[in-house]
Amino acid sequence: MGNFDWYAEETDLFELAFLDRAPESERIDLKAVRLYRLGRLRDQMAKYGLDAAMLLDSVNIRHATGTRNMQVFTMRNPPTRYLVLTADRSIMFEFTGCLHLANIGL
């Protein structure tokens, strides 16, 4: 599947704002939130003796890792993105051309 830039012709995108970068969110340490959630998930995996967990739902993946996702798209289309989580690794399998959604700087 080739990459297609839907917004290549757009010139009025300068007003777009990411919700997690809104002025009222600046004091929130998003990296700490992401690490806390991921740690809680790994704690529960250890508690129940799970060596790995596979998350398929975009909302669950976003909550566990903080990665941007395609919630609206995956509501209608079977997702081909998923997360395999172990005690020390997070392995994201992402749509072609969407790797930037998983780049959260952890």
Image (tube, helix red, strand yellow):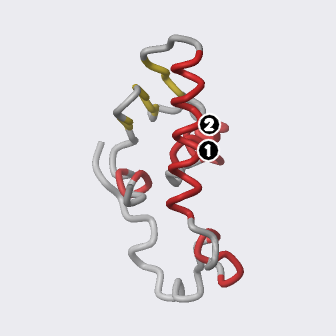
- Mark 2: which amino acid? Asn
Name the secondary structure under disc 2: helix
- The front one of 56 and 26 is 26
Quadrant position of the C terminus in the picture: bottom left
Neighbour tally class for label 2: few under 14, some 14-19, many 20 plus, Cα within 10 Å:
few
On screen, residue 42 versus residue 88, left or right, reads right
Does the CB distance between marks 1 and 2 fall below 8 Å? yes
Name the secondary structure under disc 1: helix
- The front one of 24 and 19 is 24
Most extreme residue toward the right is 24
Neighbour tally class for label 1: few under 14, some 14-19, many 20 plus, Cα within 10 Å:
some
- The front one of 87 and 24 is 87
- Distance, label 1 to label 2, CA atoms, is 5 Å
Q: Position of residue 16 (x, y in %)?
A: 58, 80
Q: Does residue 59 lie above or below 7 as drawn? A: above
Kindly identify the residue that appears in the image at 38 percent across and 64 percent down. 5
- The front one of 63 and 19 is 63
Kindly identify the residue that appears in the image at 49 percent across and 21 percent down. 53
Instruction: Provide the residue designation for mark 2.
Output: 60
Residue 63 is tagged as 1
Q: Position of residue 49 (x, y in %)?
A: 51, 11
- Mark 1: which amino acid? His
Kindly identify the residue that appears in the image at 63 percent across and 46 percent down. 71
Res 21 quadrant in image: bottom right
